[in-house]
Image: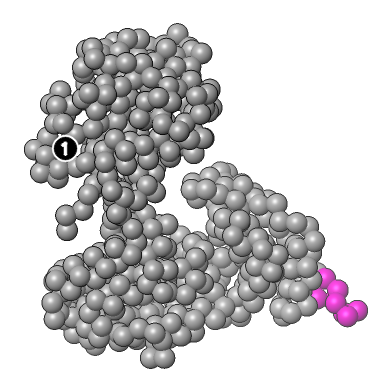
């Protein structure tokens, strides 16, 4: 596939993925590499443009990440952001120093809109700054194209050699016209045609999956989540009945979810594939008996899941390929792209490969961000309720039930959660709240219903606003909505006589309630 692409060289900046996402929003394919990548590798990829990210170091210090001067002599346009901008100046003969005043946060920047990079940008525009060092003087051949009250060089360029330096962060949404600047760089300066679209991704993937798989047998563990659903449909479109999907219903899914997955992928569904649903509910409840510690529950559910999957895989026999719903942030965060520290081990792998007899892994979504996976899903005609599904933990309701898990408690939390979700959708808040669900506290307390004493469970409602799921705040669900949900849960769900709303933010809490 001879895809037009821009590469991001990561110097340890915290926004490396954001840079790549913004580029892709301009319909240009983009990949992240560590700054340690060899110049020959860059040449071989023949990118249309190169972007250098920010980073925590000071470029004038020894041992700081750097690159050879030849990077700027390839004839490929280069855009340096923050550390990347300072480094470009430092390498090419400018001067970078520790600033008397550090700039942090939203800052007014005066740009020269006559330049190509700032074409159609307001001359006085708000940008996000985060730096201690500053460019005191630009390298020979460069012209200053932006400044702030405190920073003489907020941007500079050498138009002839197509080298551009920006001190602020256009990739951060606080930079109001940042995406436009990145568009100007990748589409106008680098001349990318903007052909990266999900329909072409879908077509290209189907073709390359066919090439790779041939007439081989393929196995996929389907969870009903967005990533594995999209991966399964792509494979089904590419190789049809050569694909077998195993869906383990561990009895800890949301209300009706198992049937919904079966309706989409099973015999009456829209896709050509072999679908096996394993109803392992009882087996999981049995295993979970007496376990109350959340980590222990997670481990138990994970291990049992693998065991069930393994048994099914054995019935199928050896396969040639195993499908994994790995997506690009998994790749970057497991230290394979860019400079990010290993944040987590490959969570999609989860120990699955070892228990199956297969030759090779297929990861059709490996290069996509989550929103792109969703777009590909819509492109493939997957129902919206699957494509826009909320994040749901692998161990499912098992961890949204405090204390021991029983079939009875699962029923209670499923019913309460379904009512809550229905009412949130009814008032149109489902699109704006990051994540919301009901959990079952292990607390029972006294109530009175129909003149009779009750001693039943308390359900907790959780709703958070979050952009990146790293931090979160309790969402302000209107009181009237909460009251309605409370009323319905008490009336309709047997075993509940109290409903509470969880106000905790993350940190100190987590988004889940376990
Ligand atoms: N470490 C450099 C500085 O403090 C660059 C910071 C950045 O890239 N955000 O100026």
Residue 2 visible in the shown view: yes
Residue occupying image coordinates x 38% and y 91%: 267
In the picture, residue 217 is in which quadrant? bottom left
Instruction: Locate residue 222, reporting x and y percent.
Output: 36, 75
Residue occupying image coordinates x 63% and y 74%: 418
Decide whether the magenta segment is chiefly helix, strand or loop: strand
Position above or below: 187 against 226: above
Residue occupying image coordinates x 51% and y 29%: 122
Position above or below: 354 against 267: above
Question: Seen in the image, is 82 located left or right of residue 260?
Answer: left
Instruction: Locate residue 402, reporting x and y percent.
Output: 59, 65
Residue occupying image coordinates x 54% and y 81%: 256
- The residue pinned by badge 1 equals 37
In the image shown, does 307 or 162 lie closer to the viewer?
A: 162
Quadrant, the C terminus: bottom right
Residue 312 visible in the shown view: no
In the image shown, does 170 or 273 lie closer to the viewer?
A: 170
Instruction: Locate residue 100, reporting x and y percent.
Output: 45, 8
In the picture, residue 195 is in which quadrant? bottom left
Magenta stretch in the rendered image = 447-454
Question: Seen in the image, is 253 located left or right of residue 50?
Answer: right
Indicate yes or no whether the magenta region holds residue 450: yes
In the image shown, does 213 or 300 lie closer to the viewer?
A: 213
Indicate yes or no whether the magenta region holds residue 370: no
Mark 1 element type: loop
Q: Which residue lies furthest to the right in this view?
A: 451
Q: Which residue lies furthest to the front in this view?
A: 114
In the image shown, does 175 or 306 lie closer to the viewer?
A: 175
């Amino acid at each position: 596939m001879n895809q037009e692409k821009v590469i991001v060289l990561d110097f340890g900046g915290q926004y490396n993925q954001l840079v790549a996402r913004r580029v892709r929003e301009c319909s240009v394919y983009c990949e992240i590499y560590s700054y340690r990548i060899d110049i020959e590798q860059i040449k071989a990829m023949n990118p249309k443009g190169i972007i250098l990210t920010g980073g925590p170091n000071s470029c004038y210090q020894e041992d700081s990440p750097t690159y050879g001067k030849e990077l700027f002599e390839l004839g490929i346009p280069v855009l340096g952001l923050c550390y990347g901008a300072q480094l470009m100046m430092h390498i090419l003969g400018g001067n970078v120093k520790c600033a008397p005043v550090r700039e942090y946060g939203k800052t007014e920047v005066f740009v020269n809109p006559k330049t190509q990079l700032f074409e159609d940008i307001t001359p006085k525009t708000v940008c996000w700054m985060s730096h201690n060092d500053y460019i005191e003087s630009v390298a020979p051949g460069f012209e200053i194209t932006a400044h702030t009250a405190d920073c003489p060089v907020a941007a500079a360029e050498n138009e002839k050699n197509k080298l551009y330096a920006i001190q602020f962060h256009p990739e951060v949404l606080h930079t109001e016209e940042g995406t436009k600047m990145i568009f100007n760089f990748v589409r106008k300066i680098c001349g990318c045609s903007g052909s990266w679209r999900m329909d072409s991704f879908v077509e290209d993937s189907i073709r390359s999956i066919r090439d790779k798989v041939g007439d081989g047998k393929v196995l996929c563990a389907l969870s009903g989540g967005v990533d594995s659903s999209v991966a399964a449909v792509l494979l089904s479109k590419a190789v049809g009945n050569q694909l077998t999907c195993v869906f383990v219903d561990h009895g800890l899914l949301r209300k009706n979810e198992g049937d919904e997955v079966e309706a989409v992928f099973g015999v009456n569904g829209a896709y050509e594939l072999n679908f096996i649903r394993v109803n392992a509910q009882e087996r999981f409840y049995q295993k979970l008996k007496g376990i109350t510690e959340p980590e222990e529950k997670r481990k138990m559910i994970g291990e049992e899941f693998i065991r069930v999957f393994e048994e099914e895989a054995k019935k199928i026999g050896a396969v040639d390929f195993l499908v994994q719903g790995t997506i690009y942030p998994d790749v970057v965060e497991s230290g394979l792209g860019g400079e990010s520290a290993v944040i987590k081990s490959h969570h999609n792998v989860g120990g699955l490969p070892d228990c199956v007899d297969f030759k090779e892994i297929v990861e059709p979504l490996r290069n996509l961000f989550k929103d792109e996976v969703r777009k590909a899903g819509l492109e493939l005609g997957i129902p919206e309720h699957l494509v826009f599904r909320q994040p749901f933990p692998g161990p499912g309701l098992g961890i949204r039930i405090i204390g021991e898990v029983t079939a009875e408690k699962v029923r209670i939390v499923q019913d309460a959660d379904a009512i809550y979700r229905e009412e949130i959708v009814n008032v149109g808040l489902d699109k704006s709240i990051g994540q919301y669900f009901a959990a079952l506290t292990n607390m029972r307390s006294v109530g009175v219903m129909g003149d009779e004493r009750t001693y039943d469970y308390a359900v907790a409602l959780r709703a958070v606003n979050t952009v990146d799921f790293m931090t979160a705040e309790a969402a302000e669900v209107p009181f009237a909505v909460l009251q309605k949900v409370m009323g319905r849960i008490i009336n309709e769900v047997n075993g509940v006589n109290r409903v509470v709303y969880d106000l905790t933010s993350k940190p100190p809490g987590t988004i889940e309630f376990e």
